[in-house]
Amino acid sequence: MSHFVKQQLKAFGVAQAIVVLKKAAGAERHPALDLRKHFQWSDLDRHLGRVLSVASAVAGAAAAPAASPMLHFRNLGIAYGTLDQQGWDNLRKEDAVAKVHGAPTVRPIRVLESKPAAAPPKLGWNLRQIGVTKLWRKGFTGKGVRVAHLDTGVDGKHPALAGVVEEFVEFDATGQRVPHSTAFDTSNHGTLTAGIIAGRRNNDRAVGVAPGCSLLSGIIIEGGDPTARLLAGLDWAVEKKVRIVNASLGFPDYSEEFLPVIKILRSNGILPVFAVGNEGPGTSRSPGNYAEAVSVGAIDRKGVVAADSGSQRFNRTADPIVPDLVTPGVDIVSTDAGGGYRKANGSSMAAPHVAGLAALLWEATPDSTVDQIEQAIFQSCTRPQSAPEDRANRGIPDAVKALALLTKPK
């Protein structure tokens, strides 16, 4: 039992748990269903239930109560919910359980600064800096590659995003899927990040790294139980067989509680891309700061790491410095909810560049593995003299070099 869980149990008498389940091969009834007896409703569940009941009443519909305090994310092989000490002890004895971890609260990585912008230039400096235009000339746009975009949603009616959103899903405050939801943004953050990944040419203006990729966008950020919403989004991503997950969120500091989930994503052939955070030097966020995830920091057009971009050194052999690399994240012009454009700063703007680049590379080399795509991106990086290693790590990726590494004769 982790120190975090012990603190939660001591302070509140209960703790939220992420339960990694053993594979149930050939079972008619999934053994996870028998674990529900160990979970209990929490104060947060009851509060969210009241909130949902009020919202449903306002909408003129009856609120459907959840059947169990335990959520089962079948595609991840994860159960999630609230346990007291007895429930925790009993759950760990169950044959169906591989591991039990705590669940620190996920928090969004907010844009540092943003303001409405005029139409972007025909080709933004950010796209030139990582060399994606040279891959476009070779005919690669990310076509056929599915990218999970887990954020505040997306304005699916934006002219530069028309036809980009292949599927859209909204998860409510408790992590339950909202039926019949159409693509919209609860703020503007998701539309900004979506545009960087996949925005298409609009009036001969380019904003997206991989304008031909398919975006699967889900609302998971802001409000409710953020860990339940994140798990729901990742479960959906596995179900939809995406190649890449892009998310600008995390637990402040370092916590290994979510590490099994990231390993599950990679075992399903998914590259997890996370913003490193905007709390400055000496800080980072989990799961982005895991060696098993790709963490991305922000750099400006002069090759200087943004002052607020996170960075941290860890006492480990594998991947001791985060972020793993840096990409453009200062004065980035992207799509804005409502149909216009917005200029924004932060590692949230940087991470989608890597997600888009991975989509280009996977279109070009569809048989590549997660490890091969990741290593090609890492090995293509060059760190400018203006960016010290402890702030920029490997430096800025080069799309052409990454493709050359993947296609190099074995």
Image: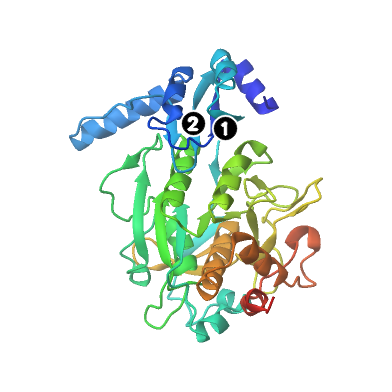
Q: Residues within 10 Å of mark 2 (few under 14, many from 20)?
A: many
39 up-or-down from 18: above or below: above
Quarter where residue 325 is shown: bottom right
Image location of residue 193, percent across then percent down: 48, 61
Which residue is label 2 attached to?
80
Label 1 sits on what residue type?
Answer: Ala
Residue 133 versus residue 256 in the image, above or below: below
Q: Residue at x 45, y 29 (%)?
A: 32
For label 1, the SS is loop
Q: Give the left or right position of residue 77, taking residue 2 as reference.
A: left
Tag 1 or tag 2, which sits nearer the N-term? 2
- Above-or-below relation of 264 to 30: below
Viewer-proximal residue, 252 or 357?
A: 357
Which quadrant: the C terminus? Answer: bottom right
Q: Dot 2: what SS? A: strand
Depth check: 377 or 4 in front? 377
Nearer to us of marks 2 and 1 is 2
Residue at 66 percent across and 59 percent down: it is: 297
Q: Residue 409: x, y in percent?
A: 68, 79
Measured Cα–Cα span from mark 2 to mark 1: 9 Å
What's the amino acid at mark 2? Tyr
Q: Are marks 2 and 1 in contact (CB under 8 Å)?
A: yes
At label 1, counting other C-alpha atoms closer than 10 Å, the crowd grade (few under 14, some 14-19, many 20 or more) is many
Where is residue 257, by image quadrant? top right
Report which residue position mark 1 lands on.
Answer: 103
In the rendered image, the residue lying farthest to the bottom is 137
Number of numbered tags placed on the structure image:
2
Residue 242, image x and y in percent? 46, 58
Q: From where the camera sits, is residue 9 visible?
A: yes
| Residue projecting furthest to the top | 86
